[in-house]
Amino acid sequence: MLRVFSSESAKSTSSYYQMAVQISEAMKAGSEGEIIVTVEESQGSVQNVMEVKARGGDYVFTTPPVLVKLAQGGKAMFKDKGDPKFDEIRALFPIPSLTMHFVMGNKSGVTDFAGMEGKTVLLGK
């Protein structure tokens, strides 16, 4: 059964947008085309949370967890903008609020995120 989701993820020139595109491609490949995630450009994390008010359940977005907490509490930039739908937000996985780089040598043959499957990756700061 084909499932289509929308994902909002920052400006198209950002690393978060590129990561969303790669995740979208990986989900399509991993589901043999049964899961399609369309990646849309947004103005940023606050807009992504605010979109929850207008979108259905098939909406995926990136935002720091603290913004969800602020939205649910009607605080800061969400003051007087509360909505019961904010309480329905569920996290799939956290994305650290930092830029992550995957650096591969030319000999690895890796040219995209999916190409790292089965490779050993050394993580560090």
Image (spheres, grey):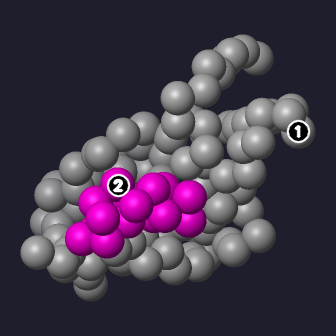
Q: Which residues are magenta?
A: 20-35
| Residue at (60, 26) in percent of width and height | 119
Circle 2 SS class: helix
Please identify the dominant SS of the magenta region: helix
Q: Residue tagged by mark 1?
A: 106
- The three-letter code of the residue at mark 2 reads Gly
* Number of numbered labels in the structure image: 2
Observer-nearest of 84 and 65: 65
Q: Residue tagged by mark 2?
A: 30
Q: Residue furthest right?
A: 106
- The three-letter code of the residue at mark 1 reads Asn
Determine the CA span between mark 2 and mark 1: 25 Å
Q: Is residue 101 above or below residue 60?
A: above
Determine whether, in the image, residue 33 is placed left or right of residue 76. left
> Which of the marked residues, 2 or 1, is nearer the chain's N terminus?
2
Q: Is residue 2 visible?
A: yes
